[in-house]
Image (cartoon, helix red, strand yellow):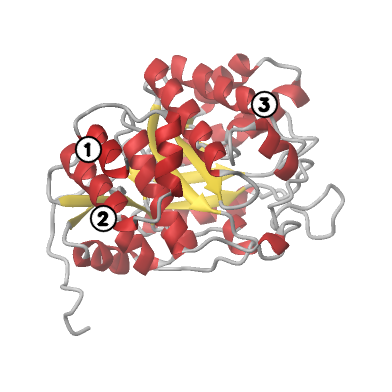
Amino acid sequence: MIATWLDKTLAGERLKPEEAVELLRSHDLAALGSAADALTRRLHGKPYRTYNIDRNINYTNICISGCRFCAFSREPGAADGYVIGRDELFRKIDETIALGGEQILLQGGLHPELKIDWYEQLLRGIKERFTRINVHGFGPPEIDHIGRVSGLPVRAVLQRLQAAGLGSLPGGGAEILVDRVRREVSPHKISADRWIEICRVWHKLGGRGSATMMFGHVETLADRIEHLERLRRLQDETGGFTAFIGWTFQPAHTELSKLGKVGAFEYLKTLAVARLYLDNFANLQASWVTQGLAVGQIALRFGANDFGSLMIEENVVAAAGANFRTSEAEIRRVIAGAGYTPRRRNVFYQLLDEPRQTPSPNAAS
């Protein structure tokens, strides 16, 4: 049946949830990868694969969410808790621009005291000084929290942040969009329905943003597919997602460290099935930040058409034990080594560069 379902998908028919679960249960990694790659080549027939340059700036590590998978956050009053100062924030953005970046990913914890006016002032300060930088900021749990602290409905929060300079919405805080799983790994975070609704409101306001999935912890294979199904349904409704990014749970220094972590086989299999299932998503990102550059390169043959970000700064995943780092030149070499021309893009997947020669991965340095 595996071959039948793969043929069906490549013929343009949608996978059913139960079929996708069986694909995840399969150990035929080669067949899954081949089908996902064929679909990706059909969607992205030109001989290039993309990446972008941005910086993940965590404006605070103070958080009342208490997620069991997080090693980065601090409780209110912690000695090493912080809220970023404007001088430090602007310095980080200056460094990002100097490296060719045109975007920052601005995320933080659920700070109990920061209200909507603080975020508006933050965004306006950025946009006044850096008129061309895109702020990709505040995932759905943060949006919900800002509303609760400020006594505002979500739509008003999103409208005010959009007016102040918010350019796009990251898909943070999705984890697995199944409430049974969420109660176990992030019991104080918003429900799956609430996460979906916040994205829906943002899309209906004309906003775009990404969708994510963190897997390889307490969820079942059926839970992964339920997550993908919810994303697919919302994308059918709004078309507001720019990309899907899946990555594996990193357990070091977290309350769930005894679970261990899944490896490249499970990552690539899930990526391939996601590509086959999310037929209405134009773009899938490789997760080299959690898997390393070698697996990231293989991911470009397992359904990913994008290598993700240079990630000038990343703190949350690093705090949980993943410390992969790279340079733009190395990203370009990796993409070229997979047989593609590397092209730089923005968060909306618009190309920003002209094709240029990239050294062969076998060339002497």
149 vs 32, nearest the viewer? 32
Q: Is residue 299 above or below residue 358?
A: above
In this rendering, position of residue 363 left or right of residue 346: left
* Residue 346 in view, yes or no: no
Residue at horizontal 73%, vertical 52%?
73
Mark 2 or mark 1: name the one nearer the start of the chain: 1
Crowd around label 3: few <14 · some 14–19 · many ≥20 (10 Å): many
Amino acid at circle 1: Asp
Residue at horizontal 16%, vertical 39%?
42
User: Which mark's residue is nearer the viewer, 3 or 1?
Assistant: 1
Secondary structure under badge 2? loop
* Residue 141 in view, yes or no: yes
Residue highlighted by disc 3: 144
Crowd around label 2: few <14 · some 14–19 · many ≥20 (10 Å): many
Question: Which residue is the extreme one toward the right?
Answer: 77
User: Which mark's residue is nearer the viewer, 3 or 2?
Assistant: 2
Question: Which residue is the extreme one toward the front?
Answer: 1
Give the CA separation, mark 2 to mark 1.
Answer: 18 Å
User: Which mark's residue is nearer the viewer, 2 or 1?
Assistant: 1
Give the CA separation, mark 3 to mark 2.
Answer: 37 Å
Amino acid at circle 2: Arg
